[in-house]
Image (cartoon, rainbow, N blue to C red):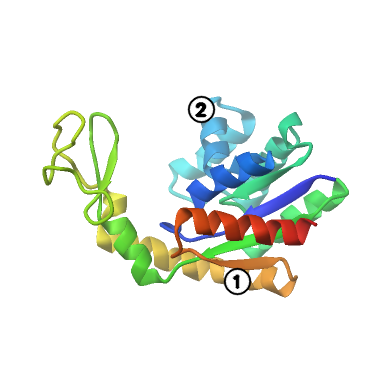
Amino acid sequence: MASFIVLLGPPGAGKGTQAQIISKTLNLAHISSGDIFRENLKNETELGKKANEFMSRGELVPDDLTIAMIQDRLSRPDCVDGALLDGFPRTPAQAEALSKMLAEWGVGIDCVPYISVAPEILIERLSGRWTCPTCGYVYHEQFNPPVVVGYCDKDGSKLYQREDDKSETVTRRIDVYLTQTSPLIEYYRGRNLLAEIDGTLSIEEVTKKLLAEIKLKIG
């Protein structure tokens, strides 16, 4: 029986890292909405062209287009045993559409792990990141500082802070996430699918708890 998991978590919660570990451990395709968008835009698919029309105008891509991209991706052979969805759905309306699509295939969402981290900790984690423009390596003022402040250990390049990693931008990103996603968290909680995990634990501990909750739900 195919297993479908939706992984939720705010920016800085470690969702991307855990998604890779969990998908590899459970041998499930890791389906990232961001990767799907980039693939369709890069390959100039019909869906990608339509999405680009909205994006070029600074508008959000409509749900039906996003759903169509997800459906196309989930219909590929590597998803025959299920998938771990990362970054989708983002709203209860998208969750309903996903549920309906999977129901047509005779399957459903088995588990929705939510990596929970307090906003102040997320801001601390994200706003201290500095990136090397040459090799792309990412440092952190507190958790992974360079030997010489402001310069890359690997090639000596002067580090810079991406707009996304500045504290005011980070705060805004987290606020938007929490505002948009709170209804989705309650949506899945109400369906007894949500499993809340403490994201302040070590990577290994978070992985251990995620796997335990997923196996409990899947059986």
Q: Nearer the viewer, residue 80 or 175?
A: 80
Q: Which amino acid lies under the numbered mark 1 shown in the image of this protein?
A: Pro
Horizontal and vertical percent position of residue 192: 74, 71
The answer to whether residue 140 is seen in the rendering is yes
Residue in front for this viewpoint, 22 or 176: 22
Q: Residue at x 75, y 70 (%)?
A: 191
**Which residue is the site of mark 1?**
183
Q: Secondary structure at mark 1?
A: helix
Q: Residue at left 63%, top 30%?
A: 46
Q: Residue 97: which quarter of the image? A: bottom right
Q: Quadrant of residue 105?
A: top right
Residue positioned 78% across, 39% down in the render: 81
Q: Amino acid at mark 2?
A: Lys
Callout 1 crowding tier (Cα within 10 Å): few <14, some 14–19, many ≥20: some
Q: Are marks 1 and 2 in contact (CB under 8 Å)?
A: no
Numbered disc in front, either 1 or 2: 1
Residue 36: percent from the left, percent from the top? Answer: 58, 37
Specify few, some or many for label 2: CA neighbours under 10 Å numbering under 14, 14-19, or 20 or more.
Answer: few
Which of pointers 1 and 2 lies earlier in the amino acid sequence?
Answer: 2
Q: Position of residue 179 (x, y in %)?
A: 49, 70
Foreground pick, 14 / 68: 14
Above/below status of 219 relative to 55? below
Q: CA distance from mark 1 to mark 2?
A: 32 Å
Residue 118 is marked as none
Q: For residue 40, which quarter of the picture?
A: top right
In which quadrant will I find the C terminus? bottom right
Mark 2 highlights which residue? Answer: 42
Secondary structure of the residue carrying tag 2 is helix
Q: Position of residue 52 (x, y in %)?
A: 51, 37
Q: Is residue 166 left or right of residue 110?
A: left
Residue 90 visible: no
